[in-house]
Image: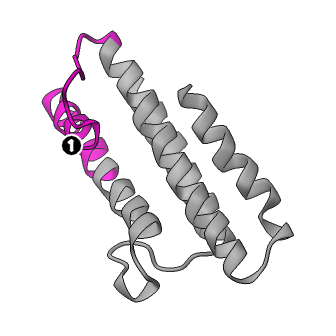
Amino acid sequence: MSKGFLKVAEDILKNIDNYSGSQKEFYIRTGISRAYYGLIWQLKERLEKQGYNFKGKNIHHFIPKVLADIGKFKEAKKFEELKTIRNDADYRYKSEFKKLKTIDKRTLKTYIKNIHLLISRIG
């Protein structure tokens, strides 16, 4: 399931030039959100294999704590940054963004790239 979310984000990126205006913005926001959920599900699966139990826990808050517990402080910080960008995309108007600067194709491409990078660092 986890890779499916990221695949949807990549498909959105591949087809983003087919859209314009607010429709394009909505797809980019959706792509960021799907990529983030691909990240959390892949990290959850990997960390569960290392013995961590996510049952009854808020996955969005528990993952960075686990990363810090295993000494992956940079990765925990990057996760929090990616989560903030996803929150911007899902919940905020452009004037309220905390981390997200623009909503364009390059933003989505960079976000997906950073998701893949973080996943590869967890092992």
Q: Residue at 80% of width from left, 72% of height from top?
A: 19
Residue 114 picture location, percent across and down: 50, 51
State which quarter of the image contains the C terminus: top left
Q: What amino acid is found at the position of numbered circle 1 in the picture?
A: His
Residue 87 picture location, percent across and down: 37, 63
Residue 28 lies in what quarter of the image?
A: bottom right
Does 42 lie within the magenta span? no
Task: Look at the image and give the residue range highlighted in magenta.
Answer: 49-78
Query: Image check: 31 left or right of 18?
Result: left
Residue position for label 1: 61
Residue 50 picture location, percent across and down: 28, 12
Name the outermost residue toward the bottom: 95
Check the image and report above or below for 50 versus 44.
above
Q: Residue at 62% of width from left, 69% of height from top?
A: 26
Q: Nearer the viewer, residue 106 or 38?
A: 38
Check the image and report above or below for 76 versus 41.
below
Q: Residue at 28% of width from left, 53% of height from top?
A: 80
Main SS class of the magenta portion in the image = helix
Name the outermost residue toward the right: 18
Q: Residues within 10 Å of mark 1 (few under 14, many from 20)?
A: few
Q: Secondary structure at mark 1?
A: helix
Residue 22 lies in what quarter of the image?
A: bottom right
Q: Residue at 82% of width from left, 69% of height from top?
A: 17
Residue 31 picture location, percent across and down: 60, 56
